[in-house]
């Protein structure tokens, strides 16, 4: 069975963006399994006492039904080096539990624990291997129009008019000043931010 996953932010016992997580889960279940029954995380998630204070991640693994629910304290990755890599064959339209495709890509590009990659597919800038990205031209923040995965934080920021979609080619990447890595656990204000001039180009 094809398993998928959702990672929901939990801060001081509060679940964030459950509507957007539910929307993505229900779309995946309909597209992949033909199921129209709606999941609503709010109805079946009960925050455990140990997660009532601090920042935690609720990880839901599911297919046709819920497979498992895990709660863990969240500590952000410490990224030092960011690089562009090319991979035209990659497909991650749904948030699959199996991330072998990314593990292989990191291995092929000799990436260590403190390295992250931004993937270029068919000459278009897409995502990092664990996040969506946003790029600043000094005024406005843009996110690639064709991401590998439509993230919930990305959807929230687009909905709120904080970022805007734009088709960004590999050659245009360095026209921007900064790049941020955003996901459900990384807020826009505190997300890891790099100067694009410090991002290693694809070989």
Image (cartoon, rainbow, N blue to C red):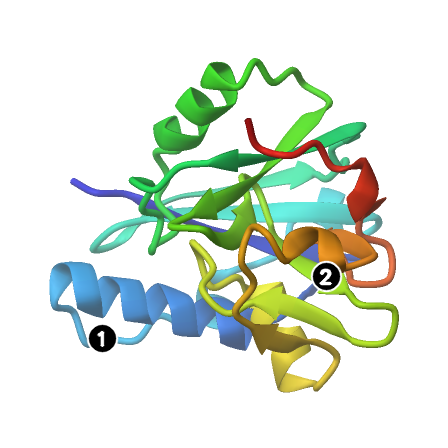
* 87 sits left or right of 20 in the view: left
Q: State which tag comes first along the sequence, 1 or 2.
A: 1
Q: Nearer the viewer, residue 2 or 183?
A: 183
* 156 sits left or right of 102 in the view: right
Q: Please, what secondary structure does the residue beneath circle 1 have?
A: loop
Q: Where is 201 relative to 187, above or below?
A: above
The N terminus - image quarter: top left
Identify the residue at the far left of this view: 34
Q: How many residues crowd mark 1 within 10 Å: few (<14), some (14–19), many (20+)?
A: few
Q: Number of numbered discs present?
A: 2
The residue identified by callout 1 is 37
Q: Position of residue 86 (x, y in %)?
A: 46, 36
Q: Nearer the viewer, residue 130 or 11?
A: 130
* 198 sits left or right of 149 in the view: right
Q: Residue 67: which numbered mark, if any?
A: none
The C terminus - image quarter: top right
* 65 sits left or right of 146 in the view: left
**Marks 1/2: CA distance?**
37 Å
Residue at image point 38% right, 50% down: 122
Residue at image point 50% right, 69% down: 145
Q: Where is 97 relative to 135, above or below?
A: above
Q: Position of residue 73 (x, y in %)?
A: 72, 37
Q: Position of residue 174 (x, y in %)?
A: 72, 51
Q: Please, what secondary structure does the residue beneath circle 2 have?
A: strand
Q: Where is 203 relative to 66, above or below?
A: above
Q: Residue 135: which numbered mark, if any?
A: 2
Q: Where is 194 relative to 12, above or below?
A: above
Q: How many residues crowd mark 2 within 10 Å: few (<14), some (14–19), many (20+)?
A: many
Q: Position of residue 118 (x, y in %)?
A: 58, 41
Q: Is residue 40 visible?
A: no
């Amino acid at each position: 069975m094809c398993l998928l996953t959702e990672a929901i932010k939990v801060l001081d016992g509060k679940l964030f963006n459950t509507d957007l997580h539910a929307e993505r889960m229900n779309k995946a279940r309909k597209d992949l399994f033909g199921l129209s029954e709606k999941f609503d995380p709010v109805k079946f998630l009960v925050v455990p006492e140990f997660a009532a204070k601090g920042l935690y991640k609720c990880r839901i693994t599911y297919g046709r039904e819920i497979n498992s629910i895990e709660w863990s304290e969240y500590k952000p990755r410490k990224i030092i080096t960011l690089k562009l890599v090319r991979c035209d064959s990659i497909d991650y339209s749904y948030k699959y539990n199996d991330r072998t495709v990314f593990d292989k890509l990191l291995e092929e590009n000799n990436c260590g624990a403190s390295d992250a990659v931004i993937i270029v597919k068919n000459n278009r800038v897409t995502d990092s291997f664990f996040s969506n990205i946003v790029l600043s031209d000094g005024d406005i923040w843009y996110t690639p129009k064709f991401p590998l995965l439509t993230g919930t934080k990305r959807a929230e920021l687009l909905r709120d008019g904080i970022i805007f979609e734009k088709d960004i080619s590999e050659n245009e990447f360095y026209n921007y000043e900064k790049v941020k890595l955003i996901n459900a656990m990384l807020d826009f204000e505190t997300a890891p931010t790099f100067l694009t001039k410090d991002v290693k180009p694809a070989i």
